[in-house]
Amino acid sequence: MTGPDSGTADLRWVLHLDMDAFFASVEQLTRPTLADRPVLVGGAGPRGVVAGASYQARVFGARSAMPMGQARRRCPHATVLPPRFPLYKAISDQVMGVLAEFSPVLEPVSVDEAFIEPPSLAGASPSDVEAFGTRLRTAVRERTGLPASVGAGSGKQVAKIASELAKPDGLRVIAHAEQEAVLAPLPVRSLWGIGPVSGEALRKIGVDTIGRLAAMDGREVAGILGSAVGTELHRLARGIDDRPVAPRGAAKQISAETTFDADLTAMTAVHEAVASICVSVHRRLVADGRAARTVTVKARTGDFVTHTRSETTPFPTRELSTLTAVARRLAETAVGEGGVRLLGVSVSGFGDEPPLALFDAVPSAQGWAAAPAAESSGDVPPGLGLALTGGPGDAATEAGPAPGTGAVPEIGAGVLGTAVTAHPTAPAGPGTAAAEGMRPDRDPDPGRPWRAGDDVAHPEYGHGWVQGAGHGRVTVRFETAATGPGRTRTLDAADPALSRADPLRSWHPEDTAT
């Protein structure tokens, strides 16, 4: 390399795009009345968790991964909405489509962020990169209607830091020549991979900035943070980051879990909850066209003691009846004394599709036995007492795994509801928190068929969303991203003209009722 910014072809440019406050921004876009108001997305129950917070809510100290009760105390005037995962996934697909048009290879980090390394920028000047980033942000806004922040630098770590510096709705290019000056004064926690524990360990020895970490002897860092993690983080602090931008590996595990508003104390309730969770896991397993051999159940008690149990089947299966039977049996041994606060089910050990046969294996008192295979439609087998009425589709986090740092971060953000979460091959990073506190796929309470945040449609008033319901009445704000702020109408909760609607219609003008 002839010089830091000499324009030679060996200069590398990695870009990181991050959708600003993605979940909350989607809600503000598709529900224009909320555009400039504080919004919290997440579970509203006593154990609900914030999945996303708008910048207007963050001003008051609310943030992702915070208990919803705490966030509401900090920002009592915020609008609280349940997550709409299918809508977030649809918009995410459009964002990734734009990135694919700008670069032949992209590395999604989560539902709302990704890295690219466009070959056309190899050896480019900072001004050329800035122009590229401006075009990218414009394209994303034109395609989705949403703001995005873009950072660019010599590697993934610098690009990620640059996008953080650019927020909200900005662009930051860290030229190679200014990289050291920009990184040095930043808090050491700005490095992706340093969490509360490692951050505190460094603080105790007076290392509170990236510059001070970079100035340390590598052996000393390894002694404090561990050989592998310490060595990698020391390199990143010095701006050395040669990790390639590459597509993410296939998921090694598919899981779903639920935190209950009240602890489950009866095994019948545990069995029902496990069956419901298995439906979510099975839906994703079938969608991926894969089969699994290993089923794992996690149970967390009211005093936060976690027990896990696993079992591996003789051959891969994707039969819901089989997976549910195994999970239920495991739950009986995983659940200890006292109530159950959280239950989770995961499947792994993926293999080829099961052989074409009329029978599959299910556990019995004598071991594994043949049983008629269930239909592949995803219906719950007879006797489970559950009805499938749709679900959230793919789950997503607002922040995702660290881009191959090799470190296992210590804290998560962007917690989701009870939905399927794919665990990629790469190590988990900031934002891969457990799915707690929400039940977006549950049936409405038959006594109160409407809940705040529901998408509805009316033949006269069009598409809208429920602002509140009770005493036989329902208040609906009729508006979409295409209409701008709309009117509020209060209707009879039993009005036959009012029906549930696809959340996508709040975003796509062509799908919006008129």
Image (tube, rainbow, N blue to C red):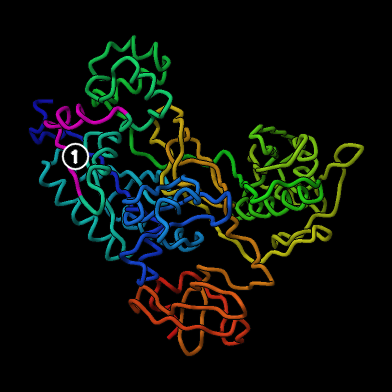
**Which residue type does callout 1 highlight?**
Ala
Residue 422 appears left or right of 27: right
- Where is residue 371? Give x, y as percent: 86, 50
What residue is pinned by disc 1?
Answer: 122
User: 514 or 119, which is in the foreground?
Assistant: 514
Q: Residue at x 31, y 20 (%)?
A: 234
Farthest residue in the bottom direction? 460
User: 232 or 46, which is in the foreground?
Assistant: 46
User: 278 or 124, which is in the foreground?
Assistant: 278
**Which quadrant holds residue 3?**
top left
**Secondary structure of residue under mark 1:** loop
User: 246 or 31, which is in the foreground?
Assistant: 31
Q: Residue at x 30, y 56 (%)?
A: 101
Q: Within the magenta stretch, is there residue 315? A: no
Span colored in magenta: 171-188
Q: Is residue 223 above or below residue 177?
A: above
* Placement of the C terminus among the 4 image quadrants: bottom left
Residue 439 appears left or right of 140: right
- Where is residue 281? Give x, y as percent: 64, 50
Q: Residue at x 40, y 61 (%)?
A: 77
